[in-house]
Amino acid sequence: MKEWKGRPYHALKVYLESRFGKPVKRIALDAGFTCPNRDGRISFGGCFYCGEEGARARYVRPELSVIDQLRERMTYWKNRGFEGYFLAYFQAYTNTYGDPEFLSSLYESVLLPGVVGVFIGTRPDCLGEDVLDVLFRLAQKTWVVVEVGVQTTNDATLRLINRGHDAGASEKALRDLGKRHIDKVVHVIGGLPHEEKYHFLQTVKDVQQWGCEGIKFHHLFVEKNTVFANWYEEGRLSLLSRETYIEWVAEALSFLDPGIVVHRLFGDCEKNKLIAPLWTLEKSQNIHLLESWMRDKGIFQGREAISFSGD
Ligand code: SF4
C-alpha cells in the first residue's frame, strides 16, 4: 500500500512541503473579475450550480485592492507564527477574462517577497493566444498554475448545466497550456445530473490524457440562489450519498497517475449558503471516511496505473 506521509493519495500539502522545504499557504484573492457566462457574452445565467460570488473564499475582502488583500492575509499568518511561503490565488470568477496587458500587470503585482507562485482560476474558453503569452512570460518569473474548470467531459451534461463550452474547449486549453509547460489543475464534479460513475471516471481519464499536474475533485452540492437550488426544491435534482461519492473518488484515484497532485477531494460551501447535502460541512469526517474506505479496500492513488504499467 503506497502512501504519501500517511495518506493514500498525493496530497497538495505533502507536495508543497517537498517542493519548497517549508509549509506553504495559499491566499485567495478577488481581483474584481466577472465571467463571460454571467455578463452576457455567453449567457447571463451562469453555470446552474454557481453561487453569486463565483466560488470566493469566505475570508476574502473584495473591497480592498488585490495587493492589500494579499498583504493583509500574509500579515495575518505571520502574526500567528507562520514562517513558510505563500501562493497568490486568483480565485473568484474568471481570472483570465480581461485585457492581456491588464492581466500581465495584475499577475506581476502579486510577486511580493515570500510569494513563491501564482494560481489562476479560469474557464477553458478564456485562454486565447494573447492570454497564453502572458501566462508563459509570467511562468519565466515564478511558478504558475492555471486552474481549469473542466467539471465534466460529457458534452450533454455541459449543455444541461449551462457551462457555455464543450469538452473540446477543455482539451484545447489543457493541451495549449501544456505546450507552454504551464502547470494545470483541473476541476471536476462528481454527481452532475444524469451522470453515472462511468461518466465521472471517464472525465478523470480524459483530463489525465489531455495533461494535468493537479486535480480538484468536488461532489455536487446545492447552494442558495442558484438554478440548481430551484431544481432541488422542485424535486428535479438528486444528489449522491456520501458513501457513493467516496466510492467514485476512490476508484478515480486508483487509476490516477501517482505524480498528479490532489488539491481537493470534496466540494466546499459556507454553512449559511448550503442547501444540501449537509454532510458537505463535515470536512474532517469526509476525508477520514474516504481514507478509511481506501485503506480497507487496499486502494491507493495509481494502484491500477501501476499494475497497467507492469510494476
Ligand atoms: S464559469 Fe465559473 S464563475 Fe462563471 S458561472 Fe460558471 S462557475 Fe460561475
Image: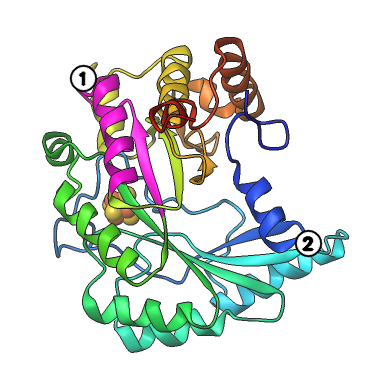
Number of numbered callouts drawn: 2
Q: Name the residue under label 2.
A: 77
Q: In the image, residue 305 lies at what x, y percent?
A: 42, 32
Q: Is 206 in the magenta?
A: yes
Q: Give the range drawn in magenta.
A: 185-209
Badge 2 element: helix
Structural crowding at the residue carrying mark 1, measured as other residues with C-alpha within 10 Å and reported as few (<14), some (14–19) or many (≥20):
few
Tell me which label, 2 or 1, sits earlier in the chain: 2
Q: Which of 56/186 is in front?
A: 186
Pointer 1: what residue? 236
| Residue farthest to the right, as pictured | 81
Asked if residue 233 can be seen in this view, the reply is no
From the viewer's perspective, is residue 43 above or below residue 303? below
Q: Residues within 10 Å of mark 2 (few under 14, many from 20)?
A: some
Q: Are marks 2 and 1 in contact (CB under 8 Å)?
A: no
Q: Closer to the observer: label 2 or label 1?
A: 2
Q: What amino acid is labelled 2 in the image?
A: Trp
| Quadrant in which the N terminus is drawn | top right
Q: In this view, does 220 lie to the left or right of 31?
A: left
**Residue drawn where x is 42% and y is 22% of the image:** 251
Tell me where residue 159 appears, x and y as whole percent. Answer: 12, 41
In-front residue for pair 105/179: 179
- How far apart are the alpha carbons under marks 2 and 1? 44 Å
Q: Is residue 135 magenta?
A: no
Q: In this view, does 262 lie above or below 232?
A: below
Residue 180 sits above or below residue 242 on the image: below
Q: Is residue 35 left or right of residue 104?
A: left
Q: Which amino acid does label 1 sit on?
A: Arg
As drawn, 197 above or below 301: above
Where does the image place residue 210, in percent across and percent down from the top left? 28, 50
